Image (cartoon, rainbow, N blue to C red):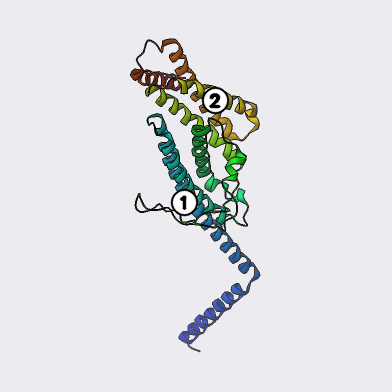
Amino acid sequence: MSKGDAQGCLKKSGGLQERDASANASSSPVIAAFKVFQQELDTKHDKHERLVKISRDITIESKRTIFLLHRVTSVTDVESILKESDVKLDLVRRKIAQIAEELKGEDIYQFHRAFTAGIQEYVEAVSFQHYIRHRTLISLEEINAMLVFTEAQSTDAKEPAEEDAPPPTVTAVSAPPFQVIPSDYLLGVADLTGELMRMCIGSVGNGDIDTPFQLSQFLRQVHDGFSYIGNSGPYEVSKKLHTLRQSLAKVEDACYALRVRGSEIPKHMLADVFASRDAMMDADEGVA
């Protein structure tokens, strides 16, 4: 046998061995099991990315609702602002219905980190609206009662193209109810205190002297409630407790200035005085 024929035989046998190895690999139970694992991981990753995107949309719409609600300190028709915020929060709830649909049959805690930021922002927005309307703190049960989706709008959460366009037709949604877990509720309420502090300063700037004292009393009650939790709650709650105390201190400082120097300072200058006080407090905290 010539040298060339030998090389040809070796190449042919090598190709047969590769095909045999490939055939054995495709029929191997280990390879088949890992292909199943790959599909499961890809499915989980895709679901996680979809939840992150929905959570970002919820955060954006919730922030827009909060910005809208801050206008109540500068308008006379508060009810129109609240009705407009109802529409925006309904859009947010339809987004949450999409999360509930994605989590159907899944363990919520496997994907919790993907959407927790959006849920916290929603809790902050809906609790801010509830406080403006009722001057009380909304409960976790009341929030979850809004997320049953027994009769809700379609899950297409796109806003109408025109401002005067009619709202979408109300239809039944098959999404299962979504339950906000206690830690997300607590973190959302902790963020609410910052918005109430801004509302206090805005109210003073518009000549409203009574609202800061109401907010101060309410924030003390919220602070007392968080103090009972202490270090026994989630780690994020203990971190936000410091921010809560800062907000309470700023509101109490504003109330002190109103009580002691309110008669000396013209109403249109009060907001500037408190803004400068806040800047000084922030600077002192930065140095510390």
Amino acid found under the numbered disc labelled 1: Lys
Residue nearer the viewer, 173 or 19: 173
Q: Which mark is residue 269?
A: none
Q: Which mark is residue 218?
A: 2
- Say which of marks 1 and 2 sits in front: 2
Residue nearer the viewer, 182 or 270: 270
User: Dot 2 surroundings within 10 Å: few (below 14), some, or many (20 or more)?
Assistant: some
Q: Earlier in the sequence, mark 1 or mark 2?
A: 1
Residue at the (64%, 29%) spot, across then down: 229
Is residue 248 visible from the viewing direction of this image? no
* Secondary structure found at label 2: helix
Report, in whole angstroms, how far the alpha carbon at label 1 lies from the one at label 2: 35 Å
Question: Percent x, y for residue 250?
Answer: 47, 21
Question: Percent x, y for residue 248?
Answer: 51, 23
| Quadrant hosting residue 35 | bottom right
Residue nearer the viewer, 166 or 63: 166
Q: Is residue 238 above or below residue 162?
A: above
Question: Percent x, y for residue 149?
Answer: 56, 52
* Secondary structure found at label 1: helix
Q: Is residue 12 above or below residue 246?
A: below
Q: Which mark is residue 53?
A: 1
Locate residue 273 relative to residue 246 in the image: left or right: left
Q: Is residue 185 above or below residue 283?
A: below
Callout 1–callout 2 Cβ contact below 8 Å = no
Residue nearer the viewer, 125 or 243: 125
User: Dot 1 surroundings within 10 Å: few (below 14), some, or many (20 or more)?
Assistant: some
Locate residue 30 relative to residue 43 in the image: left or right: right
Q: Is residue 172 above or below residue 239?
A: below
Amino acid found under the numbered disc labelled 2: Phe
Question: Percent x, y for residue 267?
Answer: 36, 18
The image shows a total of numbered marks equal to 2
Is residue 131 visible from the viewing direction of this image? yes
